[in-house]
Amino acid sequence: MGLNPFKESNISDLQKQLQVLISSRFDNIRNKLLTQWEYIKKRGNERLTIMVIPHSEKKIANLHVTLFTLTGMIVSLILILTLTSIFIINHTSTIKEVSRLKMYGSNSKIQIAKYKEEINKLYDIFQRLKPELSYLYSLTPGNRADILWAKGGVSENIDAEQEQPSPPIEILNIEEMVQDLETAKDILKDIKKFMRERRKVIENTPSMWPVDGFVIARYGIRTSPYTFQKEFHDGVDIASFPGAPIKVTAPGVVESVRWDNQLGLSVSVKHKYGFVTVYSHCQRVTVEEGQKVTKGEVIGYVGKTGNATRHICFYQIKIGTEFVDPLPYLNKVVNQ
């Protein structure tokens, strides 16, 4: 009959059987290990004789060692050779690492020398740039150009025992450039603001030649080619080929298109900030009164109307009620 695992008597019998089985297995393994150990002891205690026979007539030396001793000597020798090899390899690696670090240190010195040279060059460039920034900044209203690059002094109340060695000049140059760059950033902000405010004025100021040609009569006192008397010439005569396009020199509104016995067909353009430009002796015009024009737009063509003796554009600039010399407003080299 089989065991019923749910009865306490059967469970007790099963535990006893397992204990007996495990005990017998353990006793078998222990007996085998003891047998093996006795065999090893027997073999290890066997004595070996090593004979040392000299070439001379001296007595032969006999060395008696056990197998255990010989094995220990061989293991010790192998261990010593292994450790020695490891030490030699480590020593060789250390030597190579030291050599590499020495080379790296030498290269680092070269690199540091180059960095110092570049820092000094950059410092010199920035020192040459500072006067240019100062000049641009001096053009802005309310500037402080006189104290722009002022440097603070060093306090004299320094305890001699607490004095530290001076840093390298390159470090001082970098620190100075950092401070100056912060100042330059503020300067450029002010200049940018100033230019942005003046941009509209510049864009609406007459600043180009009205026609391709060359000046044959300047602004100021001259001898009249008609009466041969001294007179004031309140503009410039620009000679060009017949029918050459006449361009307005700034954006504005056509103030008038009229005929004059002396100036011939003439166009007057009103601009911002009180500027008025006048273009006379035109052959014909392409605009009408009240028309908006953009800078560089063609408003007429060169002619010989009025009392002109050749094909010219008589160009005038008026600010408010006064005529001014147009030459400073022309952005090209004046042709004589």
Image: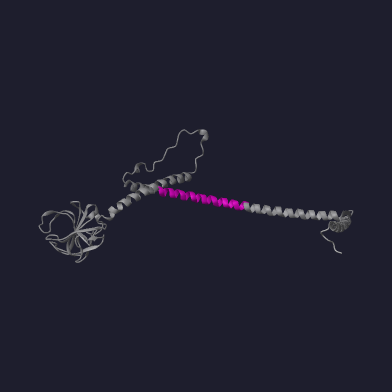
Query: Which quadrant would the C terminus be assigned to in this image?
Result: bottom left
Residue sticking out furthest to the bottom = 243
Name of the residue lying farthest toward the left: 227
| Number of callouts | 0
Residue at image position (52%, 51%) is: 111
Q: Quadrant of the N terminus?
A: bottom right
User: For the point 57% across and 52% down, which residue is it?
Assistant: 104
Say whether residue 108 is magenta: yes
Q: Is residue 80 left or right of residue 92?
A: right
Give residue 263's quadrant in the image. Answer: bottom left
Magenta segment range? 98-126
- Whether residue 53 appears in this view of the structure is no
- Identified at 73% across, 53% down, the residue is 84
Residue 78 magenta: no
| Front one among 211 and 117 | 211
Instruction: State the residue in front, 101 or 313.
Output: 313
The location of residue 169, given as percent across then percent down, is 47, 44
Residue 82 picture quarter:
bottom right
- x then y, percent, for residue 116: 48, 48
Q: Horizontally, is 298 left or right of 34 in the view?
A: left
Looking at the picture, the colour scheme in use is: one colour
Left or right of 38? Residue 241 is: left
Image quadrant where residue 211 sits: bottom left
Give x and y (percent) for residue 39: 88, 58
Above or below, comparing residue 143 to residue 230 in the picture = above
Q: Is residue 253 visible?
A: yes
Q: Position of residue 273 (x, y in %)?
A: 24, 52
Query: In this picture, is 287 found above or below 94?
Result: below
Q: Nearer the viewer, residue 142 or 134?
A: 142
- Please identify the dominant SS of the magenta region: helix
